[in-house]
Amino acid sequence: MKKLIRITTVPISLEKLLEDQLKFMNNYFEVIAISSDKDRLDLLGKNQNVKVYDLELTRKITPLKDLKAVIKLYKFLKKENPFIVHTHTPKAGIVGMLASYLSRTPNRLHTVAGLPLLEVNGVKRKVLNIVERLTYLCATKVYPNSKGLKRIILDCKFTKENKLKVIGKGSSNGIDTSYFNPRIFSNEEKENLREELGFSKKDFVFIFVGRVVGDKGINELVTAFSKLSKIEENVKLLIVGPYEEELDPIKPKTKSIINENKNIITTGFQKDVRPYFSISNVLTFPSYREGFPNVVMQAGAMGVPSIVTNINGCNEIITDNINGKIIPVKDSDALFDMMRYIMRDHDLHSNLSKESRKIIEENYEREVFWKELLEEYKKLDNV
């Protein structure tokens, strides 16, 4: 059986962004998962029934550590002689593609699920541009996970169009609509959770799910909600996700508002976000940049419409006025207006909710995506 190596910077990307995909591919290839954090990676290997190999990777610019990682990975690849090396995330991309190029791995694939460099300027931006071009140069195929991301890559001239392909209609893994299903939760379960969080039956609940960082639009969201909660009764903002203080922390003022506003409830990281979607009315996701956001697909599968920013991925899943609303990026006033509008217009909210799950089922079912990716792998035999 031919070897397929999948690499991400941190194991949570293998766990969440590629959930159960490795287990599926293990039926057709000998899969080896590579990432940092040995203990968590070992657990993933047992869960997915795949081999693992730990590699020290960081999410920051660390040239010496990165060089050591390239050398260590190069030696591993020379020994294993894989048929495919497939990387995800920027750091895993440059390290994985460079090492697999040097070791003459025949099929070097890289998935792009967002470009952090888009929010960076100056010398750092120039360095990241070089790294991105080098990653694509070493790859034999690059898979942007949205059509908009493909356009951005071409506009930035990181590579030529014949090296790029979007799998299916987008995404890195699709979504399991049998798992993300609102019918799983009984009215009693939902009422208990609402009571536990301090929500009344009348409360209209906006939810955010994801990392609590600046470029997810948290500063704008909290500003908009703070204004909304002063003029509307029975409204709540539920923030589900971990704070990240190192790379892109939210503003101190934003954090103060979150702590002081009794209508804003935070839960921290939650392994299962479905119960929180089940008691929510609208996902607010004012992100600055995305690849193809799982959160928006998850919300849709749970019958929850979304307010999203007009960025790639988000504006491909959401069709304005059909399964959600689209607003400008970094615009707290537009977000406030849309939150108030959708909260007050009950017919609009009802119609958006009805279409939300249907659109996800028709376009982004997980097993359909897996099979399309598998076909892509199989085509490599004929190249």
Image (spheres, rainbow, N blue to C red):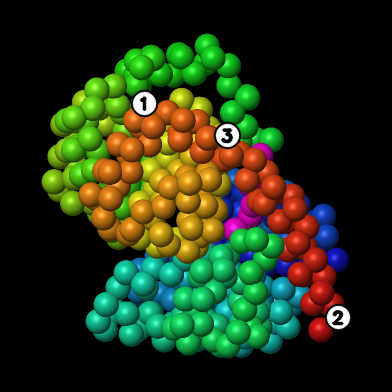
Q: Which residue is label 2 attached to?
A: 382
Q: Which is more foreground, mark 1 or mark 3?
A: 3
In the figure, residue 171 lies in which quadrant? bottom right
Q: Is residue 153 rendered to the left or right of residue 119?
A: right
Residue 329 vs 199, above or below: the answer is below
Residue occupying image coordinates x 33% and y 38%:
341
Q: Quadrant for residue 163, please give it.
A: bottom right
Q: Residue 318: in sight, yes or no?
A: yes
Q: Characterize the local packing of mark 3: few (<14), some (14-19) or many (20 or more) Cα atoms within 10 angstroms.
A: some
- From what the image shows, is residue 301 above or below residue 291? above
Q: Residue at x 43, y 62 (%)?
A: 311
| Residue topped by disc 3 | 354
Q: Are marks 2 and 1 in contact (CB under 8 Å)?
A: no
| Badge 2 amino acid | Asn
Task: Report the amino acid beneath label 3.
Answer: Lys
Vertical side of 299 occupied by 40: above or below: below
Whole-percent x and y of residue 175? 63, 47
